[in-house]
Image: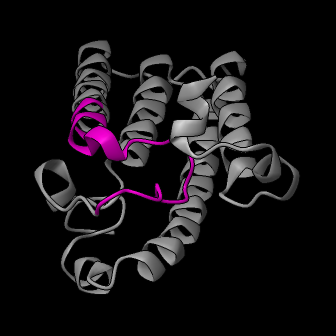
Amino acid sequence: MKIFSDWGFSRQGWRNNQRGEYWVVAQAILIVGFVVLPVYRPINLPLDKFVNLSVAALLGLAALVLLAKGLLDLGQQLTPLPYPKDNGQLVQTGVYSIVRHPVYSGLILAALSWAIFFVSLSHLVAAAILFVFLDAKASHEEGWLTQKYPDYADYRQQVKKLIPRLY
């Protein structure tokens, strides 16, 4: 299918993880696993449901904005692979001027929103695992971005990786 080749997928890549194909598979498995993970509440916490729902909704809205804006701002550079497209350009505008990996940030916030909405300890742990995984994937991706784009090192110094102004 043409869209997969446009994104950079190839038979050779699937054999040797040339462009980070295995990262994409692992990420998909983690996301599906997160969704089907059962809710675990070790104790019945006396939480204010309104506050709980409000926090979950705010995090969910922030996740949606980061995901949507991150995908839109990438435009033709969009690929699920961590390896940059051969004919791509470095995007540093829009939401990418606030955080270097807004799609990953959006996934992490969505996972936190879900964990808070369901008051689920199992999902909170899974969100932490997703954070560690996406942080490692982003680090791997940044190695390739640094090789391809000489000004990426300066961009890294100016814009945080996953959490605006913090990390």
| Horizontal side, residue 123 vs residue 167: left or right | right
Q: What's the residue at 26%, 21% (across, down)? A: 57
Q: Which quarter of the figure has residue 161?
A: bottom left
Q: Residue at x 22, y 21 (%)?
A: 54
Residue 121, percent from left and from top: 61, 33
Q: Residue 128 versus residue 5: which sits nearer the camera? A: 5
Residue 103 magenta-highlighted = no
Magenta segment, which residues?
Answer: 68-89
The residue depicted at 38 percent of the width and 22 percent of the height is: 47
Q: Is residue 109 left or right of residue 8?
A: left
Judge whether residue 79 is colored magenta.
yes
Quadrant assignment, res 17:
bottom right
In-front residue for pair 5/104: 5
Residue 26 placed where, x, y %? 73, 43
- Which quarter of the rendered picture does the C terminus lie within? bottom left
Say whether residue 80 is visible: no
Q: Position of residue 93 (x, y in %)?
A: 12, 56
